[in-house]
């Protein structure tokens, strides 16, 4: 072969990991890649797969595959073994031409064989009897390495949270390890490459342990401590391979008297409340060889069934850039010690790292974090409730770099108190953290307020994708509320590849469902106060169907869908038992709040968020009808025609009941609200009677006109009100609602200076004061679900088949927006659209990836064309006005 093909395979990945990865658990993992440009029809792909057991000879195999096998190709060789390393690269071949090799993908299996996880969980033997404000222990060991190894791994997990250090250096870049899973069922075992950090001779390994979700106080209404256990422990298994073929293993254990523990300088730590650090208790050099640990205790074994350890699909939580201080204002001074309020410009999950200097031993510096300021300029801490987000540092008189370790805060502002003299930007860094996922979606328009709203949606997503999908990152809650992600998943999965993150969480939703007999309000479920007994509530429980379906539409991964099918089916089967004979869901739950309905409808009083305008049975039935319909599609996708048919009959029954109970003959609904019409239209509950659909659209448009552009939906209606107007031909009303900046509206939040999306439309009131409700967050993603409409209607991109095999390009300009741009990295490659509207011309540029087909519909909706892979530009006379 001589000629060079210019198009190459790119972005090789294994399963749904974003790139190179250590310690995966799949022994027959699927491979995916994309192409740098349009692939010639007769080209073929060649994979080169190199396999190697640690310190053994590599075996290289060439695997010819079709050019269209590039999404989730089943593992083409014999199954992989524990610890096996794989390098894959790919190139294209065509007649006598060949492309360059792609960049290689490296991955490695973890300890897939349960009985080879030989370490034990070890930690302090003594319990101190408290449930809060407990000192956080350290664990250390030393071992001798005869020569520089060729490969070494640390397999790490913990009951609690753990940070490892080897010979004085941090291991890996992850924080909040091992992440939050339903620990009673499963605990993640992470793999780290420590080859370079090991030295010939004596080595020291040290572990910081923290309470975290395992035994720290979690949840609201006082929360609960020791949810999973009251003793912290680390699991550490070190495996070292030498050039001569020999191996060495070191296991954390309580019998060889080589593992020691002591209370460390973190005197209290809580994910919500913050962390206290007393530098006087620092033991310099404790993770270096030769440290004198004679005063330390030997560790005890903490019982845990190692079969519950599993290899993560969950992405780790990592740092993602910094926010430098925008302003630093002095708020007080006393005897040379000063207080400051620092504005970091962006609300999100982050932590401040301080460069401590000029403090005498015993001097204390504290950092209080908050999302917003009160009108008098002070930090607004009331909305934090018990989650006070307060970190303190007591100095030992030495300079230090200090960042709290086992806590995480949602804030934009921080008040530093007790600082010696001037506080400057050089004294601190503010580091952003969230789960490491790949951003795959982009959006921009000619309207800067709209762009800021989109940025705010992104920030609220990142802030709440920290190990599990949470409601908010700041107050004493931070739970995996199922309803919030149920509504936001389509937006989230367009913006980031959330496949692994959300599939991991769905494993716990399923196990909670099995344990509690329903999909709980939040997962991992923890019983407290009146939330002790989960009840089936619409939207929240519907996450069992909507989240798997959303993932499937974006990834096309049937294997993943199949693993979530039982969760969805059990939800449908449970709720069908709560329907009245006419198919309306009005019989359960018997729980004090009942259905949450259109939660946080803007007319609900601050202290009563369930008091919505729309009937709860209407909302519950509409969502359930939609879930059953989606479940029918799941059954069809998984080739279960008999089930598809059976559940289709159920869907029709509910649809008839819905119309009968909630829609009058003249098309008016029993709840004459934006939410009611939006749900009926978007969930296709009227489509069998086109005139009803038209009437509903007209009525919705009239309600929007009458409200003068003010939003009147809560969590339930908000994602659907703009799609409903758009679908029924009321684009102008959709834009007027979307672009309103009066309270309540999306752009009101932007105009009020929001840098995230808020829980309440008016978390900050028009006079600049904080909403008096006890439940007031400035960082909730639910209302940001409007971004899905921005992507599909302003940008113009929508998947029409699983995995984006087919998609629609149909921007619908309006509201004076003259430019739009959106892209999504589909499993096949980038789908992108950019358009411009001039007085007399509409111009659009579209990118269609290999293996997909796009239907392009010009504004006005008349002509449409279907195109395959390529880059296209079209212009035509403008069918809509720029105004
Ligand atoms: C959370 C919500 C959640 C709701 C349900 C709130 O406190 O922050 O987002 O879905 O409770 O009751």
Image: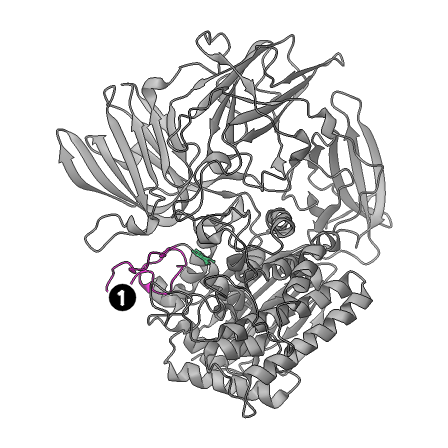
Q: Is residue 278 located in the magenta-colored stretch of the structure?
A: no
Q: Is residue 82 left or right of residue 624?
A: right
The crowd level at tag 1 (other Cα within 10 Å; few <14, some 14-19, many 20+) is some
Q: Give the percent coordinates (x, y) of residue 664.
A: 54, 89
The quarter of the rendered structure image containing the N terminus is: top right
Q: Which residues are magenta?
A: 751-778
Q: Does dot 1 land on a helix, a strand or a loop? A: loop
- Residue 868 visible (yes or no): no
Which residue, as the protein is rendered here, is positioned at the far left?
A: 335
Which residue, as the protein is rendered here, is positioned at the far front?
A: 590
Which quarter holds ligand 1?
bottom left
Q: Give the percent coordinates (x, y) of residue 822.
A: 55, 62
Picture quadrant of residue 680: bottom right
Where is 1 relative to 761, above or below? above
Picture quadrant of residue 564: bottom right
- What residue sits 47% from the left and 69% below the top? 598
Where is 663 relative to 437, above or below? below
Q: Which residue is mark 1?
A: 766
- Of residue 589 and residue 756, the one placed in the foreground of this image is 589
- Residue 24 visible (yes or no): yes
- What residue sits 65% from the left and 73% below the top? 856
- What residue sits 23% from the left and 20% below the top? 360
The quarter of the rendered structure image containing the C terminus is: bottom left
The way the protein has been coloured in the rendering is one colour
Dominant secondary structure, magenta: loop
Q: Give the percent coordinates (x, y) of residue 396.
A: 29, 19
- Asked if the beta carbon under badge 1 is closer than 8 A to the nearest atom of ligand 1, the reply is no
- What residue sits 73% from the left and 26% below the top? 115
């Amino acid at each position: 072969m001589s000629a060079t093909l210019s198009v190459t395979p790119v972005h090789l990945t294994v399963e749904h990991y974003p790139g190179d990865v250590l310690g995966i658990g799949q022994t027959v993992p699927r491979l995916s890649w994309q192409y740098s440009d349009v692939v010639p029809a007769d080209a073929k792909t060649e994979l080169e797969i190199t396999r190697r057991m640690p310190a053994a000879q590599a075996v290289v195999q060439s695997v010819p595959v079709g050019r269209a096998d590039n999404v989730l190709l089943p593992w083409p060789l014999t199954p992989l073994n524990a610890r096996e390393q794989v390098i894959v690269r790919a190139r294209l071949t065509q007649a006598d031409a060949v492309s360059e090799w792609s960049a290689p993908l490296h991955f490695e299996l973890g300890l897939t064989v349960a009985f080879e996880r030989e370490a034990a969980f070890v930690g302090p033997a003594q319990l101190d009897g408290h449930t809060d404000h407990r000192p956080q222990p350290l664990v250390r060991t030393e071992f001798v390495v005869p020569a520089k190894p060729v490969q070494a791994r640390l397999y790490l997990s913990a009951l609690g949270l753990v940070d490892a250090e080897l010979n004085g250096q941090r291991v890996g870049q992850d924080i909040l390890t091992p992440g939050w899973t339903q620990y009673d069922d499963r605990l993640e075992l992470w793999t780290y490459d420590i080859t370079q950090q090991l030295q010939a001779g004596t080595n020291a390994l040290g572990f910081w342990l923290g309470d975290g979700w395992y035994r720290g106080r979690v949840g609201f209404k006082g929360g609960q401590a020791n949810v999973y256990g009251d003793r912290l422990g680390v699991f550490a298994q070190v495996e070292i391979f030498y050039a001569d073929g020999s191996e060495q293993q070191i296991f954390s254990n309580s019998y060889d008297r080589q593992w020691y523990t002591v209370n460390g300088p973190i005197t209290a730590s809580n994910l919500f409340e913050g962390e206290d650090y007393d530098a006087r208790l620092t033991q310099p050099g404790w993770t270096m060889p030769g440290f004198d640990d004679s005063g330390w205790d030997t560790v005890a074994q903490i019982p845990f069934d190692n079969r519950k350890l599993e290899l993560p699909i969950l992405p780790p939580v990592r740092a993602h850039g910094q926010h430098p201080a925008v302003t630093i204002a002095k708020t007080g001074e006393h005897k040379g010690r000063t207080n400051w309020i620092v504005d970091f410009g962006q609300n999100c999950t982050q932590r401040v790292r301080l460069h401590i200097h000029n403090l005498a031993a015993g001097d204390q510096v504290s950092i209080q974090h908050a999302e917003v300021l009160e009108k008098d300029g002070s930090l607004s801490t009331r909305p934090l409730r018990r989650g006070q987000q307060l970190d303190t540092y007591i100095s030992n008189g030495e300079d230090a770099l200090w960042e709290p370790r086992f806590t995480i805060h949602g804030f934009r502002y921080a008040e530093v108190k007790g600082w010696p003299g001037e506080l400057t930007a050089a004294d601190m860094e503010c580091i952003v953290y969230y789960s490491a996922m790949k951003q795959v979606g982009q959006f921009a328009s000619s309207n800067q307020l709209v762009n800021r709203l989109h940025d705010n949606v992104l920030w609220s997503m990142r802030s709440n994708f920290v190990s599990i999908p949470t409601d908010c990152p700041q107050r004493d809650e931070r739970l995996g509320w199922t309803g919030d992600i149920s509504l936001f998943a389509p937006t989230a999965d367009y913006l980031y590849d959330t496949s692994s993150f959300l599939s991991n969480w769905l494993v716990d939703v399923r196990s909670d469902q099995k344990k509690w007999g329903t999909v709980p309000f939040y997962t991992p479920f923890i019983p407290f106060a009146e939330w002790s007994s989960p009840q089936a509530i619409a939207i929240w429980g519907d996450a069992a169907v909507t989240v798997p379906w959303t993932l499937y539409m974006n990834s096309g991964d049937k294997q993943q869908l199949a693993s979530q099918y039982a969760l969805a089916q059990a939800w449908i089967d449970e709720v069908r038992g709560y329907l009245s004979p006419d198919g309306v869901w009005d019989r359960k739950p018997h729980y004090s709040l009942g259905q949450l309905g259109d939660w946080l409808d803007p007319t609900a009083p601050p202290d009563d968020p369930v008091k919505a305008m729309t009937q709860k049975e209407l909302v519950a039935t509409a969502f359930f009808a939609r879930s059953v319909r989606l479940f029918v599609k799941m059954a069809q996708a998984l080739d279960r025609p008999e089930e598809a048919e059976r559940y289709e009959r159920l869907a029709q029954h509910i649809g008839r009941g819905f119309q009968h109970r909630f829609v009058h003959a003249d098309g008016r609904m029993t709840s004459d609200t934006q939410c009611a019409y939006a749900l009926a239209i978007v969930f296709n509950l009227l489509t069998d009677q086109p005139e009803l659909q038209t009437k509903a659209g007209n009525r919705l448009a009239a309600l929007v006109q009458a409200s003068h552009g003010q939003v009147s939906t809560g969590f339930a209606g908000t994602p659907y009100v703009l799609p409903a107007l758009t679908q029924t031909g009321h684009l102008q009303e959709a834009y007027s609602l979307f672009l309103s900046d009066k309270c309540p509206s999306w752009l009101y939040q932007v105009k009020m200076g929001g840098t995230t999306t808020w829980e309440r439309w008016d978390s900050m009131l028009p006079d600049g004061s904080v909403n008096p409700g006890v439940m007031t967050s400035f960082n909730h993603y639910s209302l940001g679900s409007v971004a899905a409409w921005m992507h599909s209607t302003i940008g113009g991109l929508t998947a029409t088949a699983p995995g984006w095999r087919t998609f629609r390009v149909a921007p619908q300009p309006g509201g004076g927006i003259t430019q739009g741009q959106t892209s999504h990295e589909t499993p096949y490659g980038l789908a992108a659209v950019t358009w411009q509207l001039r007085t007399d011309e509409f111009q659009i540029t579209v990118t269609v990836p290999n293996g997909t087909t796009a239907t392009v519909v010009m504004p006005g909706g008349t002509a449409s064309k279907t195109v395959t892979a390529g880059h296209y530009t079209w212009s035509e006379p403008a069918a809509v006005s720029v105004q």
